[in-house]
Amino acid sequence: MTKNELPHHHGETDESSNIREQLSDINNFQIIADTFKQLGDTTRLRIFWLLCHYEECVINISAMLDMSSPAVSHHLRPLRSSGLIVCRRDGKEVYYRAADTPQSLLLHNMIEQVMDIACPK
């Protein structure tokens, strides 16, 4: 049996061939899994949702979440490395916000739909 053949034939179309081709690109699925893994933690999810609404420094994030600054920084690192949040420096202070990407916007919308909440105005 060649790689393109299925053991059972159920009237596959060109679309099913394209789907099988997409399934073989494991890297794309790994990127998605890694992104969802970042939001699989309640604290990171809360931080991401907060940063979707406005830019904030670590000290204020810590106060809002009643956590230590090092603990917040620990959660910010993977969110930043995944591209979900970005930061800017102003003197000694570093400010974080959600990235302006379609992925961040989609995840923000998904969070609010699942939680059935609306963005603060």
Image (tube, rainbow, N blue to C red):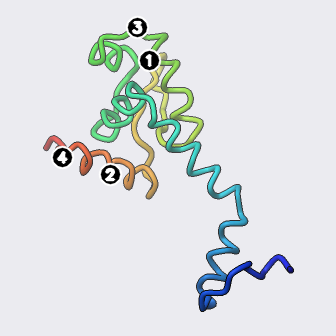
What residue occupies the far front of the structure in this picture?
A: 8
Residue to which mark 1 is pinned = 72
Estimate the spatial distance between the alpha carbons at disc 3 and disc 4, rounded to whole Å.
29 Å
Residue found 15% across the figure and 41% down from its top: 120
Vertical comparison of 105 with 70: above or below: below
Vertical comparison of 46 with 30: above or below: above
* Type of the residue with mark 1: Val
Residue 68: assigned label:
3
Q: Earlier in the sequence, mark 2 or mark 3?
A: 3
> Which SS class for mark 1?
helix
Q: Earlier in the sequence, mark 4 or mark 2?
A: 2
> Which SS class for mark 3?
loop
Residue to which mark 2 is pinned = 110
* Type of the residue with mark 4: Asp
Residue to which mark 4 is pinned = 116
Residue found 51% across the figure and 34% down from its top: 79
Estimate the spatial distance between the alpha carbons at disc 3 and disc 1, rounded to whole Å.
6 Å
- Answer yes or no: do the residues labelled 3 and 4 have beta carbons within 8 Å? no
Task: Look at the image and tell me in which quarter the C terminus lies.
Answer: top left
